[in-house]
Image: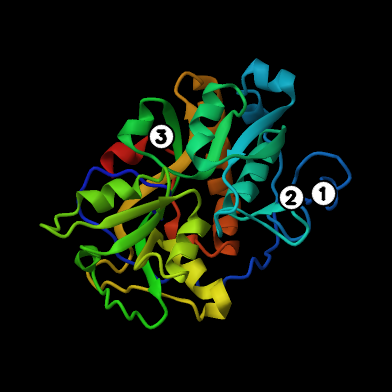
Amino acid sequence: MALRTTLTTTGLLGATAVLASLALTGCSGFGTAAAGAADAGGPDVPIGDEVSTTADPEIAALLPAAIVEKGHLDIAVDIPFPPMAMYDDTNREVGFDPELARLLGQKLDIDVSINKQAFDSVIPSLQAGKNDLILSGMNDTPERQETLNFVDYTHGGFAIVVEAGNAAGITTQSDLCGRTVAVQKATVQGELLRAMECGSSPVVVTELPSDLDAQTALRAGKADAYVSDAVVAEYAAATTSDGEAFDVVRDPENPSGFAPVYSGIGILKDDAELTEAIRQAFQALIDEGAYQQVLDRNNIGAYAVESAELNRGAGS
């Protein structure tokens, strides 16, 4: 899924239907989940029916000495951004990014601290030493690769959301010309919209602080459409007002979403040791099936990658 995207192409946006079920229902995990540990002030590990794994000492030995001495990984996550990250009714961080973060911690035999961070400040938070990793649906792009290494973890495209009934008659990406479209700030989706070839009727881009704000603008009639990655769009359409508020535009020319790109775990370019530790831990999760389980329980299994590789965004 194209998450928090920057692209160099000028096309835009289709849709995909991938969420057959939207509840975060469980599946059995690997290893033994330490239920209640986080609530008791212990390590932040999977609980209940969340997917779990076991430590790999050889991979854990790859962690930089400074991280081991600190005793935990600080992980920047923009919450809420369902189904990638959200809070459950106990205020616990759930969704793909927090659950994958806990699995990486288990595999590396180190605690994790999931730190809520606004998306437009996640990179500065690494540069300031506040966080070690970004797990926030961030697109792997050549521009971001100047600062970060990406361990790519999903691949897919974008979607357009309109009010239920689609009174505006938006059926293709070109129908966005001359329309007001809401997007989340700092995702650079605004650049894509502004780059569309619309002649004398360009897209009017409204950039808002959060993805939820962009949805709200559409619902309040302040925008004709809202643009996001396909999984988030499908989730919003299926869950807002019991599925009665929004429709996702189905573009037959882009059935899997427009312009699929890689998204991944962001790590500062200079942190080569940490990058390799995360890459190998992620590969181990792929190999044992835990990664696919986390994707599936969050209804995004169609966007899996087959191996843990770095910086594929330049080729996407």
Give coordinates of residue 87: x percent, y percent: 68, 56
Q: Mark 3 points at which residue?
A: 310
Q: In the displayed structure, would residue 226 be above or below residue 250?
A: above
Q: Which of marks 2 and 3 is nearer the N terminus?
A: 2
Between marks 2 and 1, how big is the CA–CA gap?
A: 6 Å
Location of the C terminus by quadrant is top left
Q: Mark 1 points at which residue?
A: 34
Does dot 2 land on a helix, a strand or a loop?
Answer: loop
Viewer-nearest residue: 266 or 302: 266
The residue drawn where x is 55% and y is 54% is 81
Between marks 2 and 3, how big is the CA–CA gap?
A: 26 Å
The residue drawn where x is 34% and y is 79% is 166
Residue type, mark 1 in image: Ala
Q: In this view, does 131 lie to the left or right of 261?
A: right
Asked whether the viewer can see residue 20, the reply is no
Q: How crowded is mark 1: few (under 14 residues within 10 Å), some or many (20 or more)?
A: some
Does dot 3 land on a helix, a strand or a loop?
Answer: loop
Tag 2–tag 3 contact (CB < 8 Å) = no
Colouring used for the render: rainbow
Q: How crowded is mark 2: few (under 14 residues within 10 Å), some or many (20 or more)?
A: many
Give coordinates of residue 173: x percent, y percent: 24, 65
Q: Name the residue under label 2.
A: 46
The residue drawn where x is 40% and y is 65% is 222
Which label was assigned to residue 100?
none
Tag 2–tag 1 contact (CB < 8 Å) = yes
Residue type, mark 3 in image: Leu
